[in-house]
Amino acid sequence: MSRAVILAGGRGTRLRPFTVSLPKPLMPIVDQPILEIIIRQLAIQGFDHITLAVNHQAELLKAFFGDGSRWNVKIDYSLEHEPLGTMGPLRLISDLPEYFLVMNGDILSDIGFGALLAKHKAEDRLMTVAASARQQPIDFGVLEVNDGYIRGFHEKPSIPYNVSMGIYCLSRRILPEIPASQPFGFDQLVLKMLAAGNPLRAEFHLGYWLDIGRPDDYQRAIEEWPTLKTKLGL
């Protein structure tokens, strides 16, 4: 038995005007909402209990997903009366197990959610963050300058960096670090845990990952979905 919390309460401001009348998790990727894709993936990978942390247009989400019986999972809802950020909603959920998955409701990826949680659990980790390696191209020639002299030159280089995929595995032991009844984000939690010297783990995913929060990425998701759908067996 595995538990997942999906953060589905955002207003989707970066996707306007698409999200004026429709919550972002219900935005269709060709033939089904992005959140349905996530739920189907989780169900296939052994998650049997999914909590949707909702706020904006919560009734629409409840009406669409119901109790989860269509996907052979249990779906329940945690309602935020005020936006609580990415980690704050966890303090509203009283029955979380010792280890659980948390993720944004607008992620399209071929990551193994079940395998990620299983490794997190086996190693008794506090937090595991799914990570993706990226390259940022620079459109200019970059100078290396020291004491006013040019020491090197790089024509339009790419800078490597690592990003959070918006997919996390947590232990209940981390919950006391999240203040109750106030907004608290993933960034705040990570900085707080690092300042206290707590070990946080990153697991790199080399496959597909796309956050559909921006119009360009949403359009890309639609274009690439037929190929990814076949790969995921959906």
Image: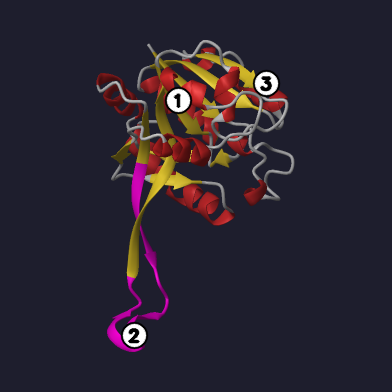
Q: Is residue 29 above or below residue 42?
A: below
User: What residue is shown at x 57% (from left), y 16% (from top)?
Assistant: 93
In terms of secondary structure, where does tag 3 sit?
A: helix
Q: CA distance from mark 3 to mark 1?
A: 17 Å
Q: Main secondary structure of the magenta part?
A: strand
Task: Residue at 59% x, 31% y: name it.
Answer: 8
Amino acid type of disc 2?
A: Asp
Q: Position of residue 211 (x, y in %)?
A: 49, 46
For the residues labelled 2 and 3, the Cα–Cα distance comes to: 65 Å
Mark 1 residue element: helix
Specify the quadrant of the image occupied by residue 99: top left
Q: Residue at x 61, y 23 (%)?
A: 180
The residue labelled by disc 3 is 63
Mark nearer the N terminus (2 vs 3): 3
Look at label 1 and name its amino acid: Arg
Q: Dot 2 corresponds to which residue?
A: 147
Q: Which residues are magenta?
A: 131-157
Magenta highlight on residue 148: yes
**C-alpha distance separating marks 2 and 1:** 58 Å
Q: Secondary structure at mark 2?
A: loop
x then y, percent, for residue 76: 58, 15
Three-letter residue code for mark 3:
Ala
The crowd level at tag 3 (other Cα within 10 Å; few <14, some 14-19, many 20+) is few
Was residue 29 drawn as part of the magenta stretch in this picture?
A: no
Residue at position x 32%, y 89% in the image? 149
